């Protein structure tokens, strides 16, 4: 394995990581995306269960974000069927799953599709293993699987999170984290998404060995069954438990969410994250970061039996870019 170049490494998955990647590309091409593989919801979750593969959806999201807008691969990777039994299924997920079966691993499949689509930014699934995120609750119960954790009744708090079986981080991922000149922890599902990447064997040690700035882009909303009632400070504390220390800088949205979208989130049990981080200079960066897309309905997830929360509110890459540039200095 050749020595990796020093890049800004993003850690996450899904729409939050896609927004961060688009923001970073506004001022640098030196980026590596490290993507989670344990989500068992959505249509990529159905593929996981059907084919016994790591989750492909978040990797596909990064690919479709980074491919050239004029390339036919942009349409291919991003297309969602809108009817029948394939309603809501992303064609890119099927493509990645097919190549994973053919190539023998998700990392090889991602490299192959990246080459064909002309994507230069390294996209690295954190592992080629197929594991579930598990939660040990404070009452001693153990729950396996992201959506089983989210839907648990009652919502007893989580004592600790772990993988079953152990998920070993890919050597290329560990090397990229060790060599990074900056780490961005992306907005997204906190406990069962971002923390799940940090739990991969080898990641925490690599993070502790690298003194580069670690920047956390805070979620706009809490997530039912995952971060109920979490303030911004509680998000940071929870992340710090698995990161080994608190992030060096935090980026927080202080803009308003359109009332129509706010209503959708409230009905689904989400609340705006309360900013209680204080005014420490050089630590907290604030701005109106909400993307005000006119066609927010296009983000609606559909499909029979689909497990997915609302995905309407996104971080605006144009607004996020200058804050990331400052925070990563």
Image (spheres, rainbow, N blue to C red):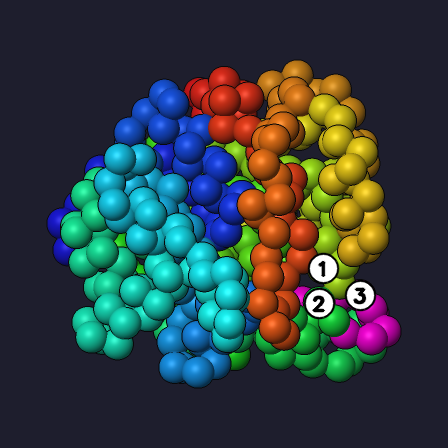
Provide residue 87's location: percent of width, then percent of height. 52, 66
Q: Nearer the viewer, residue 248 or 95?
A: 95
| Disc on the earlier residue, 1 or 2 | 2
Q: Nearer the viewer, residue 213 or 99?
A: 99
Q: Which residue is mark 1?
A: 226
Q: Assess whether mark 2 and mark 3 are in contact (beta carbons under 8 angstroms).
A: no
Q: Nearer the viewer, residue 24 or 98?
A: 98
| Disc on the earlier residue, 1 or 3 | 3
Secondary structure of residue under mark 1: loop
Residue 180 image-quadrant placement: top left
Q: Nearer the viewer, mark 3 or mark 2?
A: 2
Q: Is residue 57 above or below residue 328?
A: below
Secondary structure of residue under mark 3: loop
Distance Cα–Cα, label 3 vs label 2: 11 Å
Q: Quadrant of the N terminus?
A: bottom left
Residue 173 image-quadrant placement: bottom left
Q: Is residue 71 magenta?
A: no
Q: Residues within 10 Å of mark 1 (few under 14, many from 20)?
A: many
Q: Is residue 328 above or below residue 313?
A: above
Provide residue 142's location: percent of width, then percent of height. 69, 80
Provide residue 209's location: percent of width, then percent of height. 40, 45
Residue at the extreme left of the image, as rendered? 2
Q: Assess whether mark 2 and mark 1 are in contact (beta carbons under 8 angstroms).
A: yes
Q: Which residue is mark 3?
A: 157
| Disc on the earlier residue, 3 or 2 | 2
Secondary structure of residue under mark 2: helix
**Picture residue at 17% right of the left edge, 50% below the top:** 115
Numbered tag placed on residue 150 in the rendering = 2
**Residue 328 left/right relative to 149:** left
Taking the image as drawn, is residue 163 in sight? no
Q: Which residues are magenta?
A: 152-161
Distance Cα–Cα, label 1 vs label 2: 6 Å
């Amino acid at each position: 394995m050749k020595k990796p170049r020093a890049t800004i490494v993003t850690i996450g998955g899904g729409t939050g990581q896609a927004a961060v990647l688009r923001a970073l590309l506004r001022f640098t091409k030196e980026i590596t995306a490290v993507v989670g593989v344990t989500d068992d919801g959505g249509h990529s979750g159905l593929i996981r269960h059907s084919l016994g593969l790591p989750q492909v959806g978040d990797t596909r999201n990064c690919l479709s974000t980074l491919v050239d807008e004029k390339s036919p691969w942009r349409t291919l990777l991003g297309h969602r069927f809108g009817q029948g039994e394939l309603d809501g299924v992303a064609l890119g997920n099927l493509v990645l799953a097919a190549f994973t079966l053919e190539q023998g691993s998700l990392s090889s499949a991602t490299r192959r599709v990246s080459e064909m689509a002309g994507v230069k930014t390294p996209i690295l699934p954190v592992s080629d293993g197929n594991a579930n995120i598990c939660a040990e609750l404070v009452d001693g119960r153990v729950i396996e699987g992201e959506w089983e954790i989210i839907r648990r009744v009652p919502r007893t708090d989580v004592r600790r999170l772990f993988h079953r079986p152990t998920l070993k981080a890919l050597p290329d991922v560990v090397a990229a984290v060790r060599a990074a000149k900056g780490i961005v922890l992306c907005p997204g599902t906190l406990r069962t998404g971002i923390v799940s990447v940090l739990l991969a064997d080898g990641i925490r040690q690599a993070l502790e060995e690298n003194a580069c700035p670690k920047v956390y882009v805070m979620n706009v909303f809490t997530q039912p069954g995952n971060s109920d009632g979490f303030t911004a400070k509680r998000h940071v504390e929870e992340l710090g438990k698995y990161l080994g220390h608190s992030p060096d800088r935090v980026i927080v949205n202080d803009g308003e969410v359109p009332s129509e979208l706010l209503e959708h989130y409230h009905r689904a049990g989400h609340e705006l994250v309360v900013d209680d981080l204080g005014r420490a200079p050089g630590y907290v960066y604030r701005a109106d970061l909400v993307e005000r897309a006119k066609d927010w309905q296009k983000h609606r997830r559909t499909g029979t039996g689909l497990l997915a929360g609302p995905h309407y509110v996104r971080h605006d890459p144009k607004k996020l870019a200058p804050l990331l540039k400052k925070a990563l200095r």
